[in-house]
Image: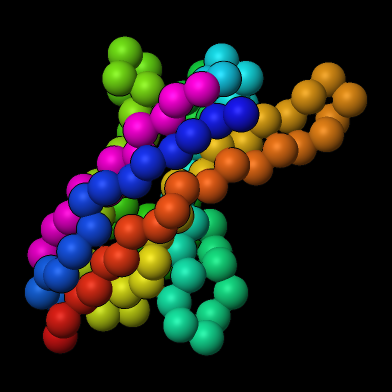
């Protein structure tokens, strides 16, 4: 099992910045990738940013150039630096950890979510 605890959400004006943190504990050695997803009211949960073991990253087109995902292995923590925030970035942001076993079975672990509100 992997436990994830997010922090750092809040209210910010458009154009402002926030940094989200996700602290992982448990069987973290088994994790293959970690990412941030978001879900706005009435919308499906969507991938925002992903960091894979080895350090490669992927971003949703809507956040490229504004958001940066990073990790601190010593602290078992993944960050999402969000700059130039827009009202459409407002959502509940969820941290995800994914484990893929040798038989290709995928296990997803989720944090409790943190609210990001962007005022125009």
* Residue 114, image x, y percentages: 33, 59
Relative vertical location of residue 20 with respect to residue 74 in this rendering, above or below: below
| Residue 16 visible within the image | yes
Query: Magenta stretch: residue 13 in it?
Result: no
Which is the main secondary structure of the residues drawn in magenta?
A: strand
For residue 59, side relative to residue 76 (left or right): right
Residue 22 vertical position relative to residue 60 in the rendered view, above or below: above
Q: Nearer the viewer, residue 61 or 100?
A: 100
Residue depicted at x 52% and y 86%: 42
Q: Position of residue 11 (x, y in %)?
A: 15, 70
Q: Left or right: 31 with respect to 56? A: right
> Which corner quadrant of the image does residue 16 belong to?
bottom left
Q: Residue furthest right?
A: 103
In x, y percent, where is residue 49?
A: 45, 49
Q: Is residue 3 left or right of residue 76?
A: right
Please tell me which residue is depicted at 84% across the width and 30% down the height of the picture: 104
Q: Measured along the vertical axis of the image, is residue 54 above or below residue 77?
A: above
Magenta residue span: 16-26
- Asked which quadrant contains residue 14, the reply is bottom left
């Amino acid at each position: 099992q992997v436990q994830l605890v997010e922090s750092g959400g809040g209210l910010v004006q458009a154009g402002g910045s926030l940094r989200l943190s996700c602290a992982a504990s448990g069987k973290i050695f088994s994790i293959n990738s970690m990412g941030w997803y978001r879900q706005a009211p009435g919308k499906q949960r969507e991938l925002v940013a992903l960091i894979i073991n080895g350090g490669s990253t992927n971003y949703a087109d809507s956040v490229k150039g504004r958001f940066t995902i990073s990790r601190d292995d010593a602290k078992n923590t993944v960050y999402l630096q969000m700059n130039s925030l827009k009202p459409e970035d407002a959502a509940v942001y969820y941290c995800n950890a994914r484990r893929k076993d040798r038989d290709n079975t995928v296990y997803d672990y989720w944090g409790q979510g943190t609210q990001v509100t962007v005022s125009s």
